[in-house]
Image (tube, helix red, strand yellow):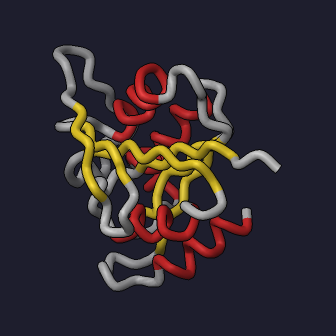
């Protein structure tokens, strides 16, 4: 069976424990491309950079996987750069945004960068979903959440 191509992003930045646990869990079952903000971009909603160039830098992730950080980019910028540049020749089968530090419930989804990234994926024709953890602790149960995502 052919391995799925998955684009992973978030709004907590490329060094977030959530995205790293997700990559650790999925790297043996899918081909991953990680494109995330270079820093925390929580509550940026569906904002987009419309002027200037956003530099992209390659970054090693703690799990040993290579990711891309978009300097000063929003989660929506990251999705568009991934789809229109980094993955333009082989679009992803799936986009996963998260694992977010903190729940995205009720009105939170209106300003969540995590949710907005998944919505941008859908807008671009990519099956997408967002994952959030109801904890603001850097020691939250990200591993449990990542295992649940892998089953999906």
Residue 16 percent location from the top left of the image: 31, 64
Query: From the viewer's perspective, is 78 left or right of 133?
Result: left
- Judging depth in this view, the residue of 150 and 100 nearest the camera is 150
Query: From the viewer's perspective, is 57 left or right of 32?
Result: left
- Judging depth in this view, the residue of 59 and 103 nearest the camera is 59
Q: Does residue 18 sit above or below 34 in this rendering?
A: below
Residue 144 visible: yes
Query: From the viewer's perspective, is 75 left or right of 130?
Result: left
Residue 116 percent location from the top left of the image: 46, 41
For the point 31% across and 81% down, the residue is: 137
For the point 44% across and 55% down, the residue is: 108
Q: Quadrant of residue 48?
A: top left
Q: Does residue 149 sit above or below 76 in this rendering?
A: below
Residue 83 percent location from the top left of the image: 49, 27
Residue 101 visible: no
Residue 121 percent location from the top left of the image: 56, 34
Residue reaching furthest to the top = 51
Quadrant in which the C terminus is drawn: bottom right
């Amino acid at each position: 069976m052919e391995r799925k191509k998955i684009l992973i992003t978030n709004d907590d930045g490329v060094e977030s424990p959530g995205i790293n646990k997700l990559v650790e869990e999925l790297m043996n079952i899918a081909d991953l491309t990680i494109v995330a903000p270079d820093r925390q971009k929580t509550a940026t909603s569906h904002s987009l950079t419309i002027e200037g160039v956003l530099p992209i830098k390659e970054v090693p992730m703690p799990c040993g996987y290579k990711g891309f950080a978009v300097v000063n980019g929003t989660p929506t910028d990251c999705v568009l750069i991934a789809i229109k540049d980094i993955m333009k020749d082989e679009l992803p089968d799936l986009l996963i945004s998260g694992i977010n530090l903190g729940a995205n419930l009720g009105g939170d989804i209106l300003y969540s960068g995590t949710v907005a990234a998944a919505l941008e994926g859908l807008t671009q024709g990519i099956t997408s979903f967002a994952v959030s953890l109801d904890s603001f602790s850097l020691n939250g149960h990200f591993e449990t959440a990542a295992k649940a995502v892998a089953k999906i």
